[in-house]
Amino acid sequence: MALSRKPCAQCKKPVQLTTISHLSGEEGGYRVVLKSLPIMMCADNHKRLINPDFAMQILDVIGRGELSGVYAAYQRGFLRRRTYCARCGFEINKAILTNREFRASMAVESGPTMEITINAPCLRCITCGIDQLPEVNEPTDRIFRALARAFRGEEIHAA
């Protein structure tokens, strides 16, 4: 993950690598918290991500269940949709929702390891015991929106 050292897009001043200790965003019951987030910042405090693909790299870490512990149940059925476990394929009762915290870490070039925490509603499979997000499409969209809200709240722009 290479750093983008091009000058600030707003004032054209040089930028340097810095970190934000805590950043969070929320969307529809899904909360994303980033700790030790690396950003590029100029002397006028204009902030941007360290490279153009950085937000997608964060989502990639979240989406890889073996790294983050975040799994998403899937649905089958045309007339009567049923929800199934992402790991073992057993049918899950959608009426039993609990909130759970998922944690992942992401190595960043020239900086500390970034910690990612997601608090989300989850279903638990009674067969294998894994907690997972209720549906494939909606949670990913909500996690992405929560991440975008976090960046907008701190006025962090794309690289």
Image (spheres, rainbow, N blue to C red):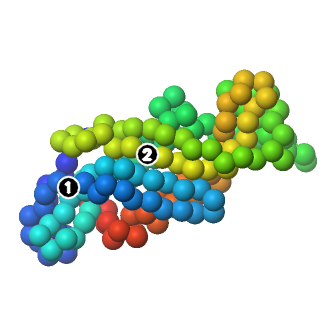
Mark sitting on residue 30:
none
Residue appearing at x 62%, y 50% in the figure: 120
Q: Which residue is mark 1?
A: 18
Q: Is residue 137 visible?
A: no
Residue under the image location 67 percent in, 27 percent down: 87
As measured in the structure, the alpha-carbon distance from the residue carrying label 1 to the one carrying label 2 is: 17 Å
Residue type, mark 2 in image: Ile
Number of numbered labels in the structure image: 2
Q: Position of residue 29 (x, y in %)?
A: 63, 59
Name the residue carrying label 2: 116
Query: Do we see residue 28 in this rendering?
Result: yes
The correct choice, above or below, for 123 with respect to 139 in the image is above
Kind of residue sitting beneath label 1:
Thr
User: Mark 2 packing: few (<14 Cα in 10 Å), some, or many (20+)?
Assistant: many
Where residue 53 sits in the image (x, y, percent)?
Answer: 33, 50
* Identity of the residue furthest to the left in this view: 14
Residue 40 image offset from top left, x and y in percent: 20, 58
Name the foreground residue: 27 vs 10: 27
Question: Would residue 110 appear left or right of 104 to someone viewing this image?
Answer: left
Q: Secondary structure at mark 2?
A: strand
